[in-house]
Image (cartoon, rainbow, N blue to C red):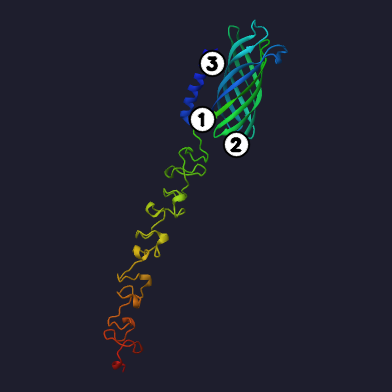
Amino acid sequence: MRKTTLLALLCIAFLGKGLAQKKDPKNAVSAKVLFIDYGSPNSVDGLSVTNGIEVGYLRNINRWLTFGIPMKVGLANVKDDVNNNRIFTSVDGILQFQFARTEDTRIIPYLMGGGGMVWEDVLGTNVQVPVGGGLNFRAGGRSFINVQGEYRLSQKENRNNLQLGVGLVHFLGKVDTDGDGIADVLDLCPHEIGTVSTGGCPDQDLDGIADREDRCPSRPGRKRFDGCPDTDDDKVADPDDECPETPGLEKFNGCPDTDKDGIPDKDDECPGQKGPASTNGCPDSDGDGITDKDDKCPEIAGLLEYRGCPFADRD
């Protein structure tokens, strides 16, 4: 029995490894401990319940149907045996009809049925038809605790039996909670759909900068500006640029200073002529505090009441 058990475990381990490489979340492997009763179905008293193990492969066909290949090794306590206990091995093909299965379902009930071959030491083989049902309890991620009961109808006398299995079912492939194609272990935002370039985090403007690090998540921008655009390409991001469509200087919050007088054009009443801040950027050639454009005598200092001309020249 030890050799048969070891062979079955090696087979399922090899199968599981191969399937895991495909990263197909529909594939699963299972392992169970079996409690086997040959006495009750055949109305035979005095036959004790025996044990076995089961390993198997499962494949979800759709949300309702699952195909399975369980392989079992155990003891059959049968009436026509001298010592009652015989080692058996079996391979089945089954279908499970599942109820209410979704990605978030905690408990998944199902009915099952199928057919298989059973080998008993030197007593040959017999065909058995298993029917039953079970429950899968989500244990976390893609793992489930499985409880299954089945009645196995055999074409050989005294071989009908009941089997109860308790074990684990694990779906292969890495867990991807948000379904964005990036495994949770590598996903910086495992509960939000994202892109590979942002480590699995959302990037609604597709600028390569995750929304959570993007000052302008709805407008494509540059990394140097934390995801914000610079429309006029003056090295001042639009949210910080008071003149976002006209190239300007950083010290003036992105606004230009055409005449280079230190007063940005938007505040300069004479943007094409240099002037001091005291005259709002307009020149005052004679220094009388009256801008040239308002000074009737721009080259001679004068008085405001005479519109920039001296008193002597008022007439």
Give the residue type at disc 1. Answer: Leu
Q: Amino acid at mark 3?
A: Thr
- Image coordinates of residue 12 in percent, x first then y, are 51, 21
| 91 w.r.t. 258: above or below | above
Asked if residue 134 is positioned above or below residue 117 in the image, the reply reads below
Q: CA distance from mark 3 to mark 2?
A: 34 Å
Which residue is farthest bottom? Answer: 315
Residue 172 - label? 1
Label 2 secondary element: loop
Task: Measure the alpha-carbon separation of dots 1 and 3.
Answer: 23 Å
Bin the neighbour count of mark 3 within 10 Å (Cα to Cα): few under 14, some 14-19, many 20 and up: some
Image quadrant where residue 275 sits = bottom left
The crowding category of the residue bearing disc 1, from other C-alpha atoms within 10 Å (few below 14, some 14 to 19, many at least 20), is many
Quickly name the residue at label 2. 102
Residue 215, how many percent across, how many down? 44, 55
Q: Based on the displayed image, in which of its 4 quarters is residue 293 positioned? A: bottom left
Q: Earlier in the sequence, mark 1 or mark 2?
A: 2
User: x%, y% of residue 245?
Assistant: 39, 63
* Crowding at mark 2 (Cα within 10 Å: few <14, some 14-19, many 20+): few
Q: Is residue 80 above or below residue 290?
A: above
Q: Which residue is mark 3?
A: 5
